[in-house]
Amino acid sequence: MSAITPRLVTCPNCKKLTEYSTSNTFRPFCSQRCKMIDLGDWANENYKIPDNKPAEPDDEID
């Protein structure tokens, strides 16, 4: 029987390789610190989803 090779992923914050498994409670991050930095970026609205819809004219009330 062959051993299972752990899946390694790059931490989204510091780019360090880290194991992606249930033993890593911070996955996909490498640490609590990197996880909290990412959460802070979301809270500060540093990440945005682009809105590609054309601008609609404002409805005027007569």
Image: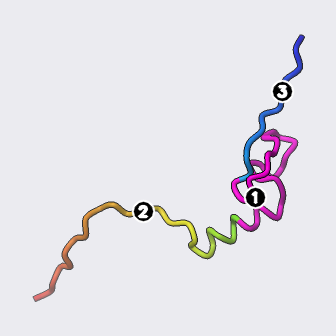
Kindly report which numbered mark, 1 or 2, lies closer to the viewer in this rendering. Answer: 1
Could you say where residue 37 lies in the image, as x and y percent from the top left? 73, 67
Q: Residue at x 57, y 71 (%)?
A: 46
Most extreme residue toward the bottom, as rendered?
62
Q: Amino acid at mark 3?
A: Thr
Residue beneath label 1, please? 14
Q: Residue 43's image quarter? A: bottom right
Could you say where residue 12 lies in the image, as x and y percent from the top left? 69, 54
Task: Tell whether 18 sits left or right of 53.
Answer: right
Q: Residue 59's image quarter? A: bottom left
The CA span between labels 1 and 3 is 23 Å
Could you say where residue 14 lies in the image, as x and y percent from the top left? 75, 58
Q: Residue at x 83, y 50 (%)?
A: 25
N-terminal label among 1 and 3: 3
Task: Tell whether 55 sits left or right of 13.
Answer: left
Whether tag 1 and tag 2 are in contact, CB under 8 A, the answer is: no
Image quadrant containing the N terminus: top right
The CA span between labels 2 and 3 is 37 Å
Whether tag 2 and tag 3 are in contact, CB under 8 A, the answer is: no
Q: Choose between 43 and 3: the one closer to the eye.
A: 3
* Residue 9 sits above or below residue 58 on the image: above
The CA span between labels 1 and 2 is 24 Å
Circle 3 SS class:
loop
> What range is drawn magenta here?
12-37
Residue beneath label 3, please? 5
Q: Residue at x 85, y 46 (%)?
A: 24
N-terminal label among 2 and 3: 3
Using a 10 Å C-alpha cutoff, classify the residue at mark 1 as few (fewer than 14 neighbours), some (14 to 19) or many (20 or more). Answer: few
Q: Amino acid at mark 2?
A: Pro
Residue beneath label 2, please? 50
